[in-house]
Amino acid sequence: MNEATRVPATAGEWQQRAEALAFEGRALIDGKMVQASSGATFDCRSPIDGRVLCQVAACDAADVDLAVAAARRAFSDRRWASRAPAERKRILQRFAALLRDNLHELALLETLDMGKPIAASIAGDVNSAARCFDWYAESIDKVYDEIAPTPERDLALITREPLGVVGAIVPWNFPMVTAAWKCAPALAMGNSVVLKPAEQSPLTAIRIGQLALEAGIPEGVLNVVPGFGHQAGKALASHMDVDGVYFTGSTATGRLLMEYAAKSNLKKIGLELGGKSPNIILSSYADLETAAITAAECMFANQGEVCIAPSRLIVERPIHNKVVEIIAEFAKSRQPANPLDPETRLGALVDNRHADRVMGYIDSAVGEGARVVTGGHRALAETGGAYVAPTVFDNVTNDMRIAREEIFGPVLSVIAVDSAEEAVQVANDSPYGLAAAVWSDHLSEAHKVAKALHAGIVYVNCYDACDITTPFGGVKQSGTGRDKSLHALAEYTEVKTTWIRL
Ligand code: NAD
């Protein structure tokens, strides 16, 4: 094994790799790496220590125009869409293989850019993104169109047609994975894509754009425009020549995107938005240790910056004290540490601004009478990074701000209830409906509660079990549309009827 392929074993070795990295901050438009046409850039700062990693192109409406025009040309001359399905499949598989070949570099970029532990970037983010491209590549030559039942003198074809130019706007918590969830099905179906990464985490999007070219995806088919939401994001979602915009991010921004679509060309919109997911543990569930540890693991994974984080733990009163005790012990053992250390399990939040926002929620909870069981403070201040200790609040009521609003940090709210019926009522009393869970050893109780939970994803006796094979998305203000699985293919296509009189 040579030095480049060896997995670094210590934070020091990862730091050395980081110092040797050549960061690319330019946009990718029409197959070329370019600066923003205004020349504007912004600091790409690491939340690990506040250090500026590089300058990134601050693309605006003029650059989005160029990227959309390139994507349109690529779609109109069919340089990608007209390739035989088996050929598009091979190219996307090569792309997935290149992501894996560049595992360490991509993982390091992700960790430096948004602060998650390097072990998670390696085991989770890069591999999930590669698997997503592989899976949709495989789907290309396995999905058939339909022929409708018609009188014998007619033939009616029902075909799926690519939309044309697709915009993908993604957040910073899983930059590569959310980009893959949009780009893979969109490219599989023959669309051209303009990808707008979050301003907090643009580096892996730019790098995977380069790898897409290397894999043989033709120029102009995948464009990457880094920049701010109110500039590049707004321009993309408002563009008259974009056929669909697929978004993962906050509910507030999702609302704006619907408005932009309504005020421009009524483009198709897919929204994967926020959550305040309830996790119900009922007294009938015997293995409290597993339920409580899973609740804590999933709450503090990715620093709590997870849309489906089980941030409202709803527990029946007889088991409440025991559950809180186990979770508090877990939280104390999972303190933030250097994300470049392979042993670290809780890293930095995305930036200091966000860490201050999380602290604002913690202060408001104390003000409203919730009890801090553990945490409630910033950590590792001497690093200059954005660290918050895992925090558990007890005595939370469902009307408190911390139970209603998405915090997107390592903050768990525990709500005690008297029955399964009350648990369901509290769980569903939320503007969100992304994920929900119930833990119960009684088959019919588990079924009844699972059915009553109003959410896009419901877990029974587990949490965050997932695979590319199952749809992902929410109801209510958690969004519209679905990522992942064959269902996502419908998002990136229009159904066309061709009626032939024979
Ligand atoms: P955000 O809405 O602030 O930003 C997301 C993206 O939208 C970024 O690329 C940003 O630049 C862009 N954007 C911001 N303002 C815009 C505007 N006016 N027009 C167009 N684009 C704009 O969200 P965030 O803080 O980056 O991400 C966290 C949010 O993402 C949380 O609410 C989280 O729940 C959600 N999320 C949801 C899922 C899901 O699948 N449901 C997955 C991950 C994250």
Image: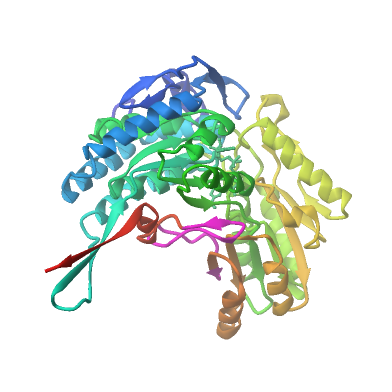
Q: Quadrant of residue 348?
A: top right
Is residue 16 or residue 140 the one in the foreground? 140
Q: Which quadrant of the rendered structure holds the C terminus?
A: bottom left
Name the residue furthest top. 39
User: Which residue is pictured at 60% across the width and 69% down the height?
Assistant: 454
Position of 196 with respect to 308 (left or right) is left
Q: Which quadrant of the rendered structure holds the N terminus?
A: top left
Q: Residue 232 appears at what percent x and percent y?
A: 51, 31
Q: Residue 384 appears at what percent x and percent y?
A: 68, 25
The stretch in magenta equals 459-481
Position of 391 with respect to 293 (left or right) is right
Is residue 151 or residue 18 the one in the foreground? 151
User: Which residue is pictured at 48% across the width and 29% down the height?
Assistant: 226
Residue 275 drawn in magenta:
no
View quadrant of ligand 1: top right
Q: Residue 243 appears at what percent x and percent y?
A: 40, 45
Residue 256: tell me if it is visible: yes
Name the residue furthest bottom. 444
Q: Up-down: is 482 above or below 8?
A: below
